[in-house]
Image: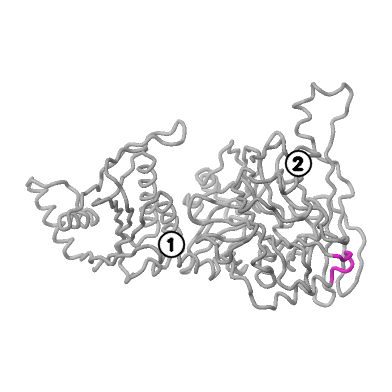
Amino acid sequence: MHLNREHFASGCLYTAGAVSQVNATIRRKQENWPTYTSRTYCIGNSEMAPLVLAREGTPTEAGMANTYNIYKVKPHKLEQLKEKLRAVGLAEQKTHVAQAYSKTFYYSEVNPGNDVWWWDTYRTFFKDGLPAPKNIFNFGMLLCQHTAQPETIYAVSLGKSHFYLSKFIQLDFGIDLAIRMADENSILLKKSRYFTGTKRQDVSSYQQFQIDSYEPGESVDHLKLKAADKDVWGKRNIIFADSIQMDMDKAPLELSEIFEQIERSYQDDKIIHLPKLEAVIEELGAELDAVAFESLKRGEGDVAIQEFQVHGVAICFSFHDYDYRISARTADDIYRKDLGNTLDIVNISEFIRDHAGITNINEISVQFKNEESGPFTKPLKELLDFPISFDGADYFLKSGEWFVFNQTFMEYLKRSLESIDIVIEEDLVEADFQNWKAEKERKIAANEPVDDKLTYREAYFNQKICNERGFVLLDRQLTLIQSLKKKKNQYRVEIADIFKSGEIISVKISETNSELIYNIEQSKDSVELIKRKTIKFDKSIKTASLWFVFEGDIRNITDYNSIQFLLAVESWHKLVKGFGLKPKIYISKHVI
């Protein structure tokens, strides 16, 4: 079932059983969903203007319960959070001090509401004299601070207030708690981000989750499941993400008991081995920001406008196309540029280079404009899909903050990569290559007959393999392909380097990550184009291989110290197996 805007019109409610796919991969493992009452709401024209799938209602167990969506606030961001609450119209109400916590409530006292997007579209159908309607969505927040330990701060969001919290909270709070107190067998729903393959994000629903079934390249950031200790947390489902959402038989003034139990659980050992991202310390984040800014100026990286995002426990789907305006606010000036309906790394890089006064990535933001939903603004960092290498490690952006992969993520990736057939091959001896090159250049200068005028290392190595082992040389055989994008020019694809007995091989001699990854991507393109019969290749293929020539002592592909390279290899691995081919990797050493 594919859902569109009409399924989420104001007043329309859909139970969990009705939702199976929403403009993204939401896979149902079985036909049965868990037994709780659940509703899907259209948030309307909130700051993000998304559609939100989130649960609101009472559990099916006997007894009344309140639903709490709890975030952990970074203590040094508390004053900034209070300023943000005032800016978005949340006025401070009463404060109660109970059970070691000061609890202050904030409420949208003055709420002008949002325009109804379909009012003008269908205006001719309405009676004359009707006033333009407004959607009123009240929202609030309970801010709770420990009286004796003021660095311990929790926020309970109500309505759309969760949209305003991302800059002020501990982003991995919920997931970090889940791995210490949840029952992995009870996973009902899982959302993940993928760093390999063609899939970017995935939401999956389960009747029975199989432990240890995470995919290589998968980072989990959203779970619905039960607690392991039912006596402490109860038997109801809990949602873990940037926040935790739970139904508890407690009043708001009794939340201190939950906060204390959370604090105790954080001291427990991990009981779930979950592949995920882990936040870096903020001091390192500042250094990474500087590296990222210089990379942006060079036009490196990518922009990712996600089809759906997670805000706390809410999974938000966007059905809008936008026009974009990039801007930067510095101490001395404000710079702006309209980008039309295209936001990519090229126009971002040009904007930075055009304005020398911009010196920090955090000065840059992007405004999204849409006639139906109105404008909203996001920091540029929240839109970047931007891995960088720094001091021998690789870092990744998530929601505008820097993360690294945890050890479990690396173990799943390593396990998959080590399943690839690895062949240790003969060395590339630099002295032999130089002798061959000098002789060939002499023949070319003397106009003596030669097969070609290629004198680079890969040409030497490929010809040597072909002459000695009977491979067919494909190096430099290019095929003209029409771009998949309309109005774009044709481009040329190098099919591979060598071929024999159903095996197609791409060879790369380099110690540069970018060149190695380019070779991997080229091999992926070739395999896909051949298997989809986009290009003519009249030979049967059973095996797709990569042949790397490294300068270091690499005996297994996981010995290569670059997460970005290993992720690229795993992405190639998935694609090759997906087309029913056998993946293989050859490794040679460049002896200088």
Does 529 sit left or right of 439 as displayed? right
Q: Is residue 53 above or below residue 175?
A: above
Q: Does residue 110 show up magenta in the picture? A: no
Depth check, mark 2 against mark 1: the one in front is 1
Q: Position of residue 297 (x, y in %)?
A: 50, 51
Q: Residue at x 53, y 71 (%)?
A: 407
Q: CA distance from mark 2 to mark 1?
A: 41 Å
Q: Residue at x 76, y 31 (%)?
A: 118
* Mark seen at residue 45: 2
Does 528 sit left or right of 539 as displayed? right
Q: What amino acid type is highlighted by mark number 2?
A: Asn
Indicate the quadrant where residue 318 lies: top right
Labelled pair 2, 1 in contact (Cβ < 8 Å): no
Q: Would you say the magenta stretch is mainly helix, strand or loop? A: helix
Mark 1 lies on residue: 566
Q: Residue at x 86, y 61 (%)?
A: 62
Q: Quadrant of the N terminus?
A: top right
Specify which label sits upstream in the sequence, 2 or 1: 2
Q: What amino acid type is highlighted by mark number 1?
A: Leu
Can the viewer see residue 429?
A: yes
Q: Position of residue 587 (x, y in %)?
A: 30, 64
Q: Which element is circle 1 on? A: helix
Q: Is residue 548 above or below residue 26?
A: below
Q: Position of residue 23 (x, y in %)?
A: 62, 43
Q: Does residue 251 show up magenta in the picture? A: yes
Region in magenta? 249-256
* Mark seen at residue 362: none
